[in-house]
Image (tube, coloured by chain):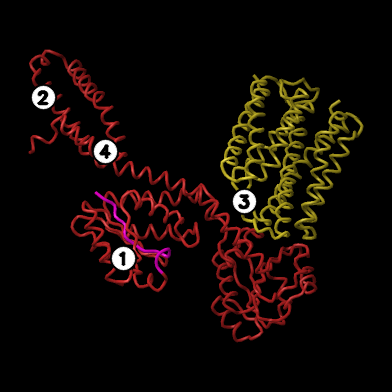
Chain colours: A red, B yellow
Amino acid sequence: MHLVLVGTSHHRAPIELRERVAVDRSDARVLAARLAEGGREAVCLSTCNRTELYLAAEDGDEAELDAVAALAAFEPAVEQALYRLRDHAAALHLFRVAAGLDSLVPGEGEILGQVRAAHELGTTGPLLDRVFRQALHTGRKVRAQTAIGESPASVSAAAAALAEQVFGELDGRSVLLVGAGKVSEQTARSLLARGAGVSFVANRTLDRAEGLARRLGSDALPLERIEDELHHADVLVASTSASGFVLDAAAVRRALGRRRGRRLLLIDLAVPRDLDPAIHELDGCYLYDIDDLEAIVAETFSGRRREAERAEAIVAAEAEKFHEWHASLEVVPAIASLRARAEEIREAELRKADALLARLDDSQRRAVESITAQIVNKLLHLPTVRLKQAAAAADGVLYAEAVRHLFGLGEDER
Amino acid sequence: MAELLFWPALLLYGEAAVGYLGDARRPGAAGRAATWGVRLGWLAQTALLAVQAAGRDGFPWAGWAGSLNLFVWLVVTAYLIWGCRRSYRLLGLTVMPLAAALLVVARAGGGTGTGAASRYSSLFLVLHVGLVLAAFAGFTLAAALSGLYLWQERRLKQRAATIFSRPVPALATLDALAFRTAAWSLPALTLGIAVGAARLVADGDPVDALVAVTGVTWLVWAAYLALRWRGGLAGRHAAYLALAGFTLVIVARLALPATHFA
């Protein structure tokens, strides 16, 4: 049984091409079921960065052709951008994908859920079940044993992570948005996803503030009234297009008097800056501008690249385990036949000695049974181990054939 | 037997201290090994204390060195409540070297043996020595949390790009834990002092330097809690006051015991 992978990803295909071969959940299920016809197994993994078909089939060449045809049916031009991998290489690729090592943002966590969903939607059997389960295990292991997915990988995620670094859990924390643009909304959503609530959206144009406030479930505020609400806020996110500061240090200092020592995190995403840098010098105030956040994201990427080396080692070890298991499938029938033949001989010899054994009492008969079974097991133990070891190397099939020949396995059926 | 248990406890605490140092440089395996060092070292020291208790009829930690041994155990016990979590490993870097060093001092003073008999009753010693030491252990941990707070706050103020390179609890969490630890410790210290003061009056003994410093320590931590409670003190300033309170704890534990235990 061969493992076949045919697919394309952001490494090989631009977005214009990827979007033409992207498959939604229900189509992925149908496509997998269709490719699995004729006793094969199939899984379709489709995300915004990749569309990949995994097949398990006795005839790998035929399965590969079918997979290529299935993707080319969406868009013929994709054929030039396809990669085709087999067995160990295909498994290694899937493990790297699940670990986030093949992602656009290394270590991103979403892919693990997407691999799990693809597995659930697929038409799987022993081989694909095994390789997908091991891929999920590898993805979890990489995230548990390395720091590849820990730091924020975008400016909005960095802002939210900073808020957690200051306040811990964000449940019940209040966010004041200054500016009603896309950047503000993105950052607000990142904070909302972690449990914070947006109390006010302040903007020079009140209409826009009201629009965003409605979407975020908060209230709108004229820009001039920020200072009045500052003492309630835990996090202030500013991203207006104002040419000067919309909030200066003196205003924040006045608000601090009413905050009873509560900390205030200020995120300035605007260029030119909205918030007076002197605010950062005030006690309990932490002001981060766009350069600071981008430096954090850059450090995250560099840290993830360092962690990726450790992750690759984990992935390689897991792929090797899969390879050993997969290769052992080649020799398992030979081992099973060998053991069946030995058992057959043992039972036949015991039957021949039936008259002699009849003189023994029950415990003595059981002892004879046990001793003969142990002899067979001990004799076959080393050949079984050696066969499994040989299976992991290239000559596993030769060994299996040699065993069949030497012991005359399968000759009766011929 | 007690001697045999001292060495594994010390070695494991030492290993934990070194492991936490390694974890600070490169988070990962060294930190995990350090946490196991703390757990196993604590078990060894617990066994050591059990052997000491079994070897004597009364309270075996009445002397200054013996009480130091018990103090180390209480500090590590308090640390273990949070210390096994990954984000608190940096706290171990402040607690475990101190624990290892104080255990060596306790041994040098003969506090890891079977101990000498005290003229005071076991009940008095449990209430006075036990409660004061438990409170001091709590203040030590509160100070360690405050130290970690100051370190992390400085990184936030410096806008370090590597702020997420190692997991550290949030400022609010560290602040709240330090406050809560101190809030549990102060009543214990109050009761311990009250029991000691009652005996002092009954015996007509004079107030020595250790008693005076312990009283000042109580005042500092009471001020810390009162100011925090009323909202006038927070963040960095509260952390500085906690460290000042800890300095007095160290003076009371190391510099003055001779005057009191004599």
**Subunit ID for the residue under disc 1:** A
Magenta segment includes A12 = yes
Q: Amino acid at mark 4?
A: Gly
- Check contact, mark 3 vs mark 4: CB within 8 A: no
Task: Kindly indicate whether the residues beneath marks 3 and 4 are on one polypeptide chain.
Answer: no
Q: Is A276 placed above or below B229 here?
A: below
Main SS of the magenta part reads strand
Task: Kindly indicate whether the residues beneath marks 1 and 3 are on one polypeptide chain.
Answer: no
Q: Which mark is residue B166?
A: 3
State the CA–CA distance, disc 2 to disc 3: 68 Å
Q: Which mark is residue A348?
A: 2
When asked about the image quadrant of residue A163, the answer is bottom right
Residue to which mark 1 is pinned? A28
> Circle 1 sits in a helix, a strand or a loop, which is it?
helix
Which residue is located at x 34 percent, y 63 percent?
A82
Residue to which mark 4 is pinned? A396
